[in-house]
Amino acid sequence: MSSLQKSIMKNKLPPRIPKSSGVSKLAPFGAARRKDYTPVSWQQYFENYVDVETEAGTFRVYMSPEPDHPSRPRIFTLHGGGYSGLSWSLFTEEITNMIHCQVVSMDVRGHGETKVKDPDDLSIETLVRDVEQVIQKLYNDEPPPLILLGHSMGGAIAVRVAHSPLLEHHIQGLAVIDVVEGTAMEALASMQSFLRGRPTHFKSIEHAIEWCVRSGQVRNVDSAKVSMPSQILNCQTGELAINEVDSYRSEEADRVPVAGHRPPDVNAIAEESDEAIELSPTDENGAHSAHTFAIPQAVADNSMKYKWRIDLSRTEKHWEGWFGGLSYAFLHTRAPRLLLLASVDGLDRELTVGQMQGKFQMQVLTRCGHAVHEDTPGEVARVVAAFALRHRLTAATENGEQMNLVSAPGC
């Protein structure tokens, strides 16, 4: 590995658990666990879902209750690579309590419960076409006012959809979370190393949720409990784990390691290498800039019941297409623009110039990882709600009025 790649990895990886945390690196996985990792149903956050049929296949779309008037905006959310529409669950609960709107959350091709003819075609052109067709099917070619909100890969899709001749005049706002062309392109060189570091299988849904939280992929356990089951499949049935949540019974069986090439015993997490425990730079508040957490893979055996819904390593050929030219496209979007970042150092040169010229609104939310909307859903909802109110796209609810949203930070 080159010195450049090592430098990128050190800057992009979130922290391992600090040595001062009191958690032994050789402690049995799940030992001294105090949190509840039992999965939670999506129905606690969304009213219903629809499976939208298009020429490409069937797309799962989750929806909050319809707004009180047809003129109210629909916040159309697009998740990042490997996640699902359910990653917006806690955000949905928060923002619908602040402003009059409906959240419409789509599982992108190859993710979640979406089933298409060619799930491996994740080119940016295909992803944009999917969103266009889903929106047209949902609203019979007459879309209501739309606010596009995308995270990571979903942010790249949202920016391109905002330029769609079919939808451009219906899009009243564009918000993207933690995706910047310059930093994303730099990180691509070491992305395969990140992905190889994840465990390939999990013993139970609870194990997957616990890994998700302890690894830093999602730092908010409540969000991980609803979103992680939509990212893993049952190896025996081939069905998404969310189909088991309603009847799920907590398992307290002996735990297995989720990390370590050569674990000292079957109940221990192996020592990490020096490279694996490098901490990312901290800001003035001590928060780390986090993107992907890399740990050695678990050994898949007969006790490992679940695996990832999508093999992200196979999407590598599309990565440059997702992020190349993104900054220019974002800056030249007709609709008002909002950029939310997990690090103050996240801007590239083009966006730095644009921000200084006042071409878009920016908010940095510290003490969160790459999945900003999952780690701090209330703060993200507050910023997005204030953005919508500032541009007079909707009205505040009674609760929102009490929050004085127009004075929200960064707005």
Image (cartoon, rainbow, N blue to C red):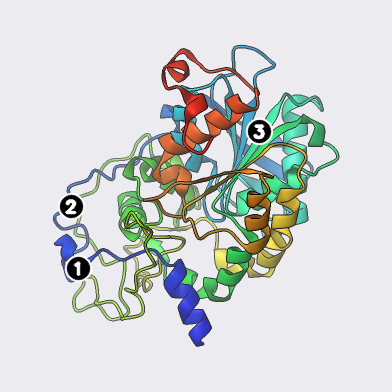
Decide which of 38, 287 is in the foreground and name it: 287
Residue 163 spot, x, y in % from top left: 79, 44
Q: Which residue is at a point 42% across and 22% down the rendered structure image?
A: 403
Structural crowding at the residue carrying mark 3, measured as other residues with C-alpha within 10 Å and reported as few (<14), some (14–19) or many (≥20):
many
**What is the three-letter code of the residue carrying label 3?**
Ile
Q: Is residue 184 above or below residue 364?
A: below
Indicate the amino acid at tag 2.
Answer: Arg
- Name the residue tied to disc 1: 19
Q: Foreground: 180 or 267?
A: 180
Identify residue for label 3. 147
Instruction: Inspect the image, locate mark 1, and give the three-letter code of the amino acid beneath it.
Output: Lys
In this view, 189 is above or below 383: below
Residue 300, percent from left and from top: 37, 69
**Of marks 3 and 2, which one's residue comes earlier in the chain?**
2
Q: Which residue is mark 2?
A: 33
Are the residues tagged 3 and 2 within 8 Å (C-beta)?
A: no
- 74 left or right of 88? right
Does the rendering let one see residue 167? no
Q: Residue at x 61, y 35 (%)?
A: 61
